[in-house]
Image (cartoon, rainbow, N blue to C red):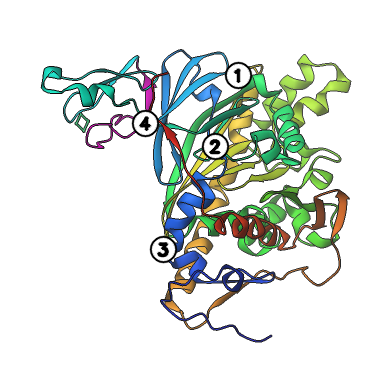
């Protein structure tokens, strides 16, 4: 294969050269100018996940969220009703809200004391008589994104008023989101709980790359799989050992969204039986057997373990097992990763505990393997600038693409179709100079 030379330090944004069908240039992961452009074109101009309504259950509950590097607050107003406003004072841009979340009917900027209500509307300016008519005619409320939409409790926003509707954006991913929510007892029973948070020294896309990577499991997580096999003779994720011959598939769902569907191997018989041992497992199983009809026991036990899906909603929302992972890019080589545990409103304490033990199994037992590799990938791309490319060609030329429905492509589970698919969307978004809008008028 010939090599296309991209001049080191070149500012030219030759997208077709940087992102090819089967390889990607290192600059896409290391260049601060490209990162800055991504924050506008891939994040602000695209639908980005903010939070789940269960995180702000009461009136005036709020939480800080991020659209790329832009900081916003989501405040609850009622059933299925939220207001999203910028966490940036209309006076001289100070951060208004310094708490990650809580309940507040007003927000006072700590710098000069401007007061906003819980919809981000300015209602108090100390020493107001010092301002004249020009000021009074200005809209000085906190800036709201152009569009906010909710799909089954999942709140998204974009600064692009020309972005297609959220459901169109989700496309094929919708029915898999529904499947995932059904595993949580339906969307009205999902409770997003606390998060494990960590900061990694890598580009946000290195994490997204791994979200649809069915290739790395027996290598990156070798110690976990070996321990499970040695002690218990197989178990969860052992079916990745010969993954392309398994029943699992990788799906390109369109718009950068993808899925590793583990369910054909994990949930075909008994997902519960494949789960690694956990504290309290035997007592929980006895409790389920004593309190359910025999024909229901297997389904109840399976509902305590993960959903068997790695469902990735580009660019920042990942459903993994029973958890929700949110990516928050910080700079070209820094990303914050938020792993949210989930609970079910319809589950008893025993079920909640067992679900929590499952969620402790992963990420705690496995994510550090991945995190280490993420940082080493970034290091390689930054410290070997003359070796310019990363390869994403696995199953590119094997003719294994299967179109199961228009725009829904299945591949063997170790394929790098996940990366090829999302980079197609990335390139399309990065090719357009978007018009970004925030609204500061009175509600
Ligand atoms: S910057 Fe907020 S009141 Fe001055
Ligand atoms: Fe992994």
Q: Earlier in the sequence, mark 1 or mark 4?
A: 4
Residue corresponding to mark 1:
349
Neighbour tally class for label 4: few under 14, some 14-19, many 20 plus, Cα within 10 Å: few
Q: Earlier in the sequence, mark 2 or mark 3?
A: 3
Viewer can see residue 369: no
The magenta segment: 86-104
Quadrant containing ligand 2:
bottom right
Q: Earlier in the sequence, mark 2 or mark 1?
A: 2
Residue corresponding to mark 4:
100
Q: CA distance from mark 4 to mark 3?
A: 29 Å
Q: CA distance from mark 1 to mark 4?
A: 28 Å
When the figure is inspected, residue 205 is found, relative to residue 439, above or below; the finding is below
Q: Earlier in the sequence, mark 1 or mark 3?
A: 3
Residue corresponding to mark 3:
33
Q: Which mark is residue 161?
A: 2
Q: Secondary structure at mark 2?
A: loop
Q: Which of the 4 image quarters holds residue 229? A: bottom right
Q: CA distance from mark 2 to mark 1?
A: 44 Å
Percent position (x, y) of residue 365? 56, 49
Which residue is at a point 48% across and 83% down the rendered structure image?
386
When the figure is inspected, residue 289 is found, relative to residue 163, above or below; the finding is above
Q: Secondary structure at mark 1?
A: helix
Q: Which mark is residue 175?
A: none
């Amino acid at each position: 294969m010939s090599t296309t030379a991209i001049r080191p330090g070149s500012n030219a944004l030759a997208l077709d050269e940087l992102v090819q069908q089967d390889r990607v240039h290192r600059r896409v992961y290391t260049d601060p100018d490209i990162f800055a452009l991504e924050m506008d074109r891939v994040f602000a101009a695209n639908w980005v996940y903010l939070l789940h309504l269960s995180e702000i259950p009461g009136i005036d509950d709020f939480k800080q969220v991020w659209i790329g590097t832009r900081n916003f607050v989501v405040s609850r107003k009622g059933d299925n009703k939220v207001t999203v406003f910028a966490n940036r004072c209309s006076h001289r841009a100070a951060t208004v809200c310094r708490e990650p979340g809580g309940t507040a009917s007003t927000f006072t900027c700590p710098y000069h004391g401007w007061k906003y209500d819980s919809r981000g509307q300015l209602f108090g300016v100390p020493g107001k008589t010092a301002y004249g008519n020009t000021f009074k005619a200005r809209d000085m409320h906190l800036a709201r994104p152009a569009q906010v939409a909710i799909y089954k409790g999942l709140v998204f926003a974009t600064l692009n008023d020309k972005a297609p509707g959220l459901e169109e954006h989700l496309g094929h991913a919708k029915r898999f989101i529904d499947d995932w929510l059904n595993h949580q007892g339906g969307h009205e029973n999902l409770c997003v709980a606390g998060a494990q948070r960590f900061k990694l020294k890598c580009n946000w896309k290195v994490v997204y790359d791994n979200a649809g990577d069915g290739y790395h499991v027996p290598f990156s997580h070798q110690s976990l799989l070996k321990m499970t096999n040695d002690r218990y003779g197989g178990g969860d994720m052992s079916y990745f050992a010969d993954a392309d011959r398994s029943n699992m598939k990788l799906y390109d769902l369109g718009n950068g969204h993808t899925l590793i569907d583990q369910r054909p191997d994990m949930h075909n018989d008994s997902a519960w039986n494949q789960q690694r041992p956990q504290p309290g497992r035997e007592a929980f199983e006895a409790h389920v057997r004593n309190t359910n009809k025999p024909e229901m026991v297997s389904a109840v036990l399976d509902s305590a373990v993960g959903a068997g899906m790695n469902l990735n909603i580009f660019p920042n929302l990942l459903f993994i097992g029973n958890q929700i992972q949110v990516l928050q890019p910080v700079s070209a080589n820094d990303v914050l990763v938020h792993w949210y545990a989930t609970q079910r409103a319809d589950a008893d304490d025993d079920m909640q505990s067992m679900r929590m033990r499952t969620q402790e199994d992963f990420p705690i037992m496995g994510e550090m393997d991945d995190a280490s590799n993420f940082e080493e990938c970034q290091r390689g791309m930054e410290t070997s600038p003359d070796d310019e490319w990363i390869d994403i060609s696995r199953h590119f030329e094997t003719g294994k693409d299967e179109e199961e429905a228009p725009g829904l492509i299945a591949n063997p589970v170790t394929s790098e179709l996940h990366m090829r698919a999302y980079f197609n969307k990335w390139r399309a978004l990065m090719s357009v100079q978007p018009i970004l809008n925030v609204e500061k008028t009175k509600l």
